[in-house]
Amino acid sequence: MRLGDAPIGAAFLALAVAVLWHIRDFPPAPGQPYGPALFPGLIAAGLALASVLLMVSAWRPGVQTSEGQAAGGEGDVRAEAPRWLPFIATVGALVGYVALVDRLGFIITAFLMLCSQFAAYRVRPALIVPVAAVSTLLVHAAFYKLLRVPLPWGLLSGWTW
Amino acid sequence: MEALAAAFQMVFSVQTLVVMVLASLFGLFVGAVPGLTATMATALLVPITFFLPPIPAIAAMVTATAMAIFAGDIPGCLVRIPGTPASAAYVDETYRMTMKGHAETALGVSLVFSVIGGLFETQVLILAAPALAAAALQFSSFEYFWLVLLGLTCAVFVSGDAPLKGMITLFLGLLLGCVGLENPAAHPRFTFDSPDLLSGVSLIPAMIGLFAVSEVLRFSLDANPLATVSRQVGSVFRGMGAMMRRYPVQTLRGSSLGTVIGALPGAGADIAAWMSYAMSRRFSKEPEKFGTGHPEGLVEAGAANNSALAGAWIPALVFGIPGDSITAIVIGVLYMKNLNPGPTIFINNPSSIYAVFLLFIIANLLMLPLGWLCIKVAARLLRTPRNLLMPVILLFCVVGAFAINNSPFDLWILVAAGLLGWFLETHGFPIAPAILGMLLGTMLEEHFIRSMIKSDGNLIAFVERPIAAGLALLVLVVWGVSAWLGWRRRRAIA
């Protein structure tokens, strides 16, 4: 799933225009001509210009390849098609953690998050539960006890330690 | 001389030395955990320093921050997650070195040149503190405007072969930095009526998301998840003598630039690392090797971020003006301990000043054995298979992002930044400029608006002061050279 530079440039151009449209309503700073709209306006104008240049360069042969290869990691050795299940599981675990951590508490949520990802990454089934449990408790000990980060207890509120 | 003897006595007491070792271990841990910064290490130490005499209290903060800045390189090198923002400039470089099987060289360079940078800077702190601070004190908003612009310019060059895409992510970062109340009229910009966004997009969760979560997401799409990269960390110190002989100019340049940047109020170790990495690339005889796992930029930037750390103490001690967020906390502790910073402290309490100098030297020397130990432990931990490691790293990310402000909203920033970072990187957009844009956006706007008001909109005023004009010229030269190089490369392809 790779988009070309042209549609991405168009998306950034749209963003820049949206910002320029949005800042029209910003009130001026009292007593002086340089208000809160000036700086974001300049930035958005710069973004618009760069987006247009990106779209132009996408149509010019020879340039795109050098730009395209710039930052990728191990992308070039990816012979097989990417597997989407682990990706969805990862995003799901992340969003699930953020949505549930206050209700279920850190220990339960983190444990579930780790288990679901281990399963999606095809970790040996016998390892999943023990590794998830030990990692959860270690992270909890380091951050809650040592660094005093108030991780929520959620359902376990009655059994805090 | 008497003062110096007294300083030795204060520093080489059992209590001070025990505090230093404990603070080192604490700093190494905090630095090595992504999402916990050196600033956070200092802040966490404040309640503890309350129970300590002045010199051990300062010792704890000096050692913990020095260790944290170095330890930030370790996870960056092994799993491409910068432990602190100061390591972000060269995280790709060290990670590539690890992928090529040179993890021990990368970590060795980080460690040894951190120590060299720190020791170099301590010399400057001792010899030239008052003069340097006096120069930085004369800076006005015009000079700051150009200085920040120079930093951002460098961010685009750090991004490598895609300056146009780097510029786009830089603008994106600057726009993200605009979110919130912090602007000339305190108007809630781009907050969409969300109270959580009034204070802006939190930098640390965004950074963890862009750099670390995106890496986990990319791993999850990898068709071959069980392949572990051999992260054998061999002899860390081997070949370091040769490095020193090979890159003496880079070491000196990185340390000097770090000193100057660190001494400027508001600019700290992270900016120093970005700028010297970019500078190293520009002046290198082999710039094409940068970003592929080449130690040269690492030598320079590694020395720079540690020297900036000590450099920040120059204005802090001499004028009571913090050089960075860490020394801002330190100044508070100094007042608490009746060591009010300012020119008079050099006259009234010279032994304490000498003691601070000594502490810096010892802290940097302690880094060699303790840093080595930390590398060994971290390398063993990180040798576990990636399909076990990645979920745990993701857990660290969410907990680290939460730990900064204890704000659940920051977790959503983390998720959004993670997805954005993954998308941008898959399409060849460098991420680093976005981070620097967010980091420096507020500062750039503040100095820009202040300068505009002072000069009544007259742009000539931006270059009327000699130092401002010099910095402006430097920015123009950097842009010009880069545009010319890009044009030449494009012609070579066509």
Image: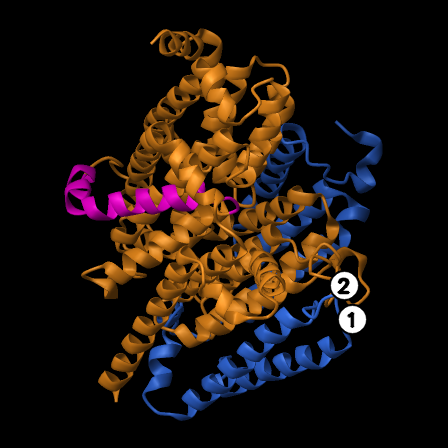
Q: Which residue is mark 1?
A: A27
**Chain letter behind tag 2:** B
Q: Give whichever of B430, A144 is nearer the camera.
A: B430
Q: Could you tell me which quadrant the C terminus of chain A lies in?
A: top right
Q: Give whichever of B233, B115 is nearer the camera.
A: B115
B120 falls in the magenta region: no
Q: Which residues are magenta?
A: B239-266
Residue B259 picture location, percent across and down: 37, 41
Label drawn at residue B187: 2
Identify by letter the chain in orange: B
Q: Give whichever of A27, B198 is nearer the camera.
A: A27
When asked about the image quadrant of residue B482, the answer is bottom left
Residue B192 picture location, percent across and down: 78, 68
Residue B424 picture location, percent across and down: 51, 71
Residue B165 picture location, percent across and down: 45, 75
Q: Is residue B441 left or right of residue B200?
A: left
